[in-house]
């Protein structure tokens, strides 16, 4: 026989929250639609079952309220209050969402077109990026914890239930018993299935990839009849490609496959990288906004995110080296270009002697020293070659013999010079 409910519509909790109708019930808590009589506002109220405290549910409820209060992200459900009933039962008060649970949208084997599924889940990926930056790992990402709330003509996907979230700055071991599975089996990461204690953000990367896989194919990547067989499949099996389900394309499968790697070192190292890859995939399909109508370029491809979503390497060491190798490769290429430009400049520059010599005077302005002509010889024609300036005249045996008059210098244009002159390179001087 079922245990009668401990709460009924009309009950007043903490003197101001009147219960109206139950919205959903789990093994440890019930969610109610309630009315805040003090503020005249409709809210959602999550109330822990009286017999659920054996598993530390009250403390988890308080931790959920604290975790959500730290985030303040539009894709995370808002928490307004945490309090106790007169009987000592804990509850938290949250915003009441008007929308559809993603699990209900999927139904039994239903699927969502690939582009629509990615548009719906990218805001959830953004919320996880914010949670991880705040040191919070959700550990239970699944369709049941995602609500597609209505926000005008767009949707605002919301991530719920941080009840088993892990925070790096708290002693979370107090509420996690050794060897106890935390989360929903079908969405557990391999490290969760092994009950590992060093859970980090890559666990959420795995669960997000499982959720997106289910959205686009209508099937779970790992599905067995018993929980033990399911956990063994998660730790050792390989998922079928989404192409075998006639969903998406090879690039989308590459992105999802990177989130479903058994080894955390080979998996996408952050939701930021996976989200950026999915945003680029949407842009390649001609989609520029997520389900909220927000620009993919602005959220995922801005200066605060990596320029490209690179697949994780096979080892953690290589993953950490990849950005450095890319950076030094770019620096080396830039240095090579600079060297080539310097060599080209040296090849086209004038010879050093010509570069530092002063410009020679025009030919027409050079002084001409006439050659001494013996007595009785015919006069020298004006066009005769001019002797070098250093030539000395021959001794004349007759001291009183008259000297020949120097020929008038030819008229020339000073600005012009023969290109065959030794200093003709000055005409090519780029300076």
Image: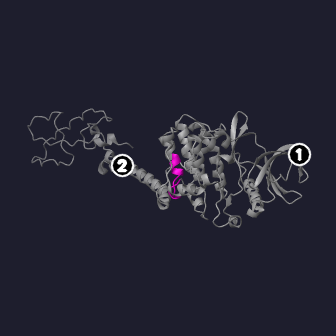
Query: Which mark is on residue 74?
Result: none
Residue 134 in the image, given as x and y percentages of width and height: 67, 57
Residue 381 in the image, given as x and y percentages of width and height: 15, 33
User: Would you say residue 260 sits in the magenta stretch?
Assistant: yes
Q: Main secondary structure of the magenta part?
A: loop
Above or below, 189 relative to 249: below
Residue 232 in the image, given as x and y percentages of width and height: 54, 57
Q: Which residue is mark 1?
A: 39
> Residue at the location (68% across, 47% down)?
144
Q: Tell me, yes or no, if residue 326 can be seen here.
A: yes
Residue 98 in the image, given as x and y percentages of width and height: 75, 39
Q: Is residue 143 left or right of residue 369?
A: right
Query: Is 82 in front, or is 145?
Result: 145
Q: Tell me, yes or no, if residue 301 can be seen here.
A: no
> Residue at the location (36% across, 49% down)?
340
Question: Quick one: which residue is furthest to the left in this view?
Answer: 376
Judged from the image, the secondary structure of the residue bearing numbered disc 2 is helix
Q: Earlier in the sequence, mark 1 or mark 2?
A: 1
Give the quadrant of residue 84.
Answer: bottom right
User: Would you say residue 75 sits in the magenta stretch?
Assistant: no
Q: From which residue to which does the magenta span run? A: 255-267
Judged from the image, the secondary structure of the residue bearing numbered disc 1 is loop
Quadrant position of the C terminus in the picture: top left
């Amino acid at each position: 026989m079922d245990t009668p409910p401990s709460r009924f519509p009309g009950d007043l909790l903490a003197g101001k929250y009147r219960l109206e109708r139950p919205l959903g019930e789990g093994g440890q808590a019930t969610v109610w639609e309630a009315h805040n009589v003090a503020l005249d506002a409709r809210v959602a109220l999550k109330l822990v079952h009286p017999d659920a405290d054996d598993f530390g549910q009250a403390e988890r409820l308080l931790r959920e309220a604290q975790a959500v209060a730290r985030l303040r992200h539009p894709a995370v459900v808002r928490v307004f209050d945490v309090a106790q009933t007169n009987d000592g039962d804990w509850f938290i008060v949250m915003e009441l969402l008007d929308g559809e649970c993603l699990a209900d949208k999927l139904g039994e084997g239903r699927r969502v077109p690939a582009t629509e599924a990615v548009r719906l889940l990218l805001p959830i990926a953004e919320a996880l990026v914010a949670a991880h930056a705040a040191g919070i790992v959700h550990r239970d990402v699944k369709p049941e914890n995602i609500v597609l709330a209505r926000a005008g003509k767009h949707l605002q996907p919301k991530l719920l239930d941080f009840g088993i979230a892990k925070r790096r700055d708290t002693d979370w071991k107090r509420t996690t018993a050794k060897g106890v599975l935390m989360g929903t089996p079908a969405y557990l990461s391999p490290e969760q299935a092994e009950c590992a204690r060093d859970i980090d953000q890559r666990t959420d990367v795995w669960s997000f990839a499982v959720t997106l896989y289910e959205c686009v194919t209508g099937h779970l990547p790992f599905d067995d009849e018993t929980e033990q067989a399911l956990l063994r499949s998660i730790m050792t099996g390989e998922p079928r490609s989404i192409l075998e389900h006639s969903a998406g394309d090879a690039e989308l499968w590459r992105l999802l496959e990177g989130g479903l790697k058994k080894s955390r070192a080979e998996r996408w190292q952050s939701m930021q990288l996976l989200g950026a890859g999915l945003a680029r995939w949407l842009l390649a399909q001609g989609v520029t906004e997520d389900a909220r109508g927000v620009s993919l370029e602005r959220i995922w491809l801005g200066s605060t995110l990596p320029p490209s979503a690179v697949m994780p390497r096979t080892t953690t060491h290589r993953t950490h080296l990849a950005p450095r190798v890319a950076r030094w490769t770019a620096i080396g290429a830039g240095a090579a270009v600079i060297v080539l430009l310097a060599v080209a400049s040296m090849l086209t520059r004038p010879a050093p002697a010509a570069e530092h010599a002063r410009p020679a005077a025009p030919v027409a302005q050079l002084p001409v020293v006439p050659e001494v002509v013996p007595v009785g010889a015919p006069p020298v024609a004006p066009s005769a070659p001019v002797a070098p300036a250093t030539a000395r005249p021959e001794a004349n045996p007759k001291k009183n013999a008259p000297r020949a008059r120097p020929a008038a210098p030819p008229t020339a244009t000073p600005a012009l010079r023969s290109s065959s002159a030794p200093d003709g390179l000055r005409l090519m001087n780029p300076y």
